[in-house]
Amino acid sequence: HRLGAADAATGAFAVVRLRIVPRSSGEGNIFETEFAGSPQIDAFNTAVARGVATTCSEGVEGEGRIIDTRTIFIDGAFHASRSTPAAFERAATAAMHAACAAATMRRLDPLVSVDIQVGRDHVLPVVNDLAVNGGNEIRRRLAASGVVVTVELPMRAYLVYGEHLAAMTKGAGKLIGEPKLTRWAEVRRTDRR
């Protein structure tokens, strides 16, 4: 991304070129720089790292955080008197937004585990319904009042699943306990029938 013009008389100037490479799930974000030279460049590298980190934590256009990437500051340009760290941070943020708009990205949803208490007659319908809602069964165990099925559900499905479960089981099924975040994953989107 280019901020300002090199031949302009006033205004901030910064050029930031980034390469963004996906990493394996759970490896986190890292920032590296290949932009080197005068001591002034160290401040620009720090500013670019800050712009990249801010964009990763805030996300782009409400799509959630950016995770598991390796971002390399591969090249840049600066003006001896008009370039500032703030200009490089803004240019890095704009470069990240442009890269995300051009990239094929996957949206990851938080998955939570929670226990569902149901009668024995409702176990199979509930387990089948979980698949429709992007969830899956982890385990089940007998309880004094029926069966407790531990499930993993996308957070978006969990938020409405208690009401759906009550309707499906005619009030006999309920969510018990607090949900626990288990992982982030790409979730297949399906419509309820």
Image: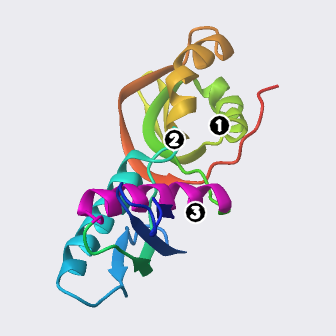
Q: Residue furthest left?
A: 39
Q: Secondary structure at mark 2?
A: strand
Please give the name of the residue rendered at 25% of the width and 69% of the height, measured from the top-left corner: 81
Q: Which residue is mark 3?
A: 99
Closer mark to the observer between disc 2 and disc 3: 3
Q: Are marks 2 and 1 in contact (CB under 8 Å)?
A: yes
Q: Position of residue 7 (x, y in %)?
A: 46, 68
Q: Quadrant of residue 176?
A: top left
Task: Name which of mark 2 and mark 3 comes first in the sequence.
Answer: 3
Residue 130's disc is 1
Please give the name of the residue rendered at 60% of the width and 27% of the height, measured from the top-left corner: 120
> Looking at the image, which is closer to me, 51 or 176?
51
Q: Which residue is mark 2?
A: 151
Please give the name of the residue rendered at 42% of the width and 60% of the height, measured from the top-left corner: 91
Check if residue 100 falls in the magenta segment: yes
Q: Are marks 2 and 3 in contact (CB under 8 Å)?
A: no
Give, as a single range, the part of the protein colored magenta. Answer: 82-102
Q: Is residue 22 visible?
A: no
Task: Name which of mark 1 and mark 3 comes first in the sequence.
Answer: 3
Check if residue 179 falls in the magenta segment: no
Q: Amino acid at mark 3?
A: Ala
